[in-house]
Image (tube, rainbow, N blue to C red):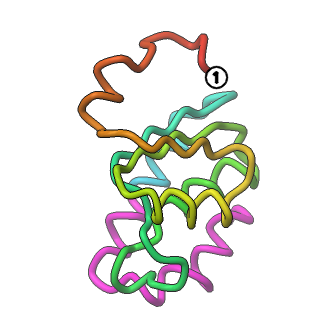
Amino acid sequence: MSTFLNVMKTEYFPYLGSRTSTFKMMFEYLDSLNKDKYLIVETGTTRYTNNIEGDGASTFMFDLYCNTEKNGIVYTVDIDPQACENVRNHTSPKTIVCLNDSVKFLSTFPRSEEHT
């Protein structure tokens, strides 16, 4: 099992409740793509640092994914300046936090690899 999944099993899965299987399936799917570099775009960022049971902490999981065995970059978009600041302070440089309306952001987001 990968380092990423080992961390997920101890730090996230026990707190995700019914969402555990969905997150596990999503990350297993990403692994199955076997890419050299991943691009993850998230609309609606994690709002609170220690609220895995409530928010789910997906931003932190995506950041972890791109910092273990997988090379990648995460764009997370939210209209809440406090949520953006919180995530910016608790993620790596591989996570780009965008204070913006997600619909507007997605309408202008490049559709090529030029942003990675």
Q: What residue is drawn where x is 67% and y is 59%? A: 91
Residue stretch in magenta: 1-25
User: How many discs appear?
Assistant: 1
99 drawn magenta: no
Q: Which percent across, then down, holds residue 68?
A: 75, 55
Q: What residue is drawn where x is 63% and y is 46%? A: 95
Q: Where 110 falls versus 102 (above or below)?
A: above
**Mark 1 secondary-structure assignment:** loop
Q: Which percent across, then down, holds residue 90?
A: 67, 66
Q: Which percent across, then down, holds residue 28?
A: 48, 53
Residue of label 1: 116
Q: Mark 1 Cα within 10 Å, few/some/many (few <14, many 20+)?
A: few
Where, quadrant-wise, is the C terminus in this rendering?
top right
Identify which residue, 12 or 97, lies in the foreground: 97
Q: What residue is drawn where x is 24% and y is 33%? A: 103
Which of the 4 quarters of the picture holds residue 107? Answer: top left
Identify which residue, 29 or 112, lies in the foreground: 112
3 drawn magenta: yes
Identify which residue, 33 or 40, lies in the foreground: 40
Q: Where 98 falls versus 50 (above or below)?
A: above
Chief secondary structure of the magenta portion: helix
**Image-based side of 37 in relation to 82, left or right:** right
Q: Which percent across, then down, holds residue 50?
A: 53, 85
Q: What residue is drawn where x is 34% and y is 50%? A: 79
Three-letter residue code for mark 1 = Thr
Which of the 4 quarters of the picture holds residue 17? Answer: bottom left
**Image-based side of 116 in relation to 108, left or right:** right
Q: Where 66 falls versus 86 (above or below)?
A: above
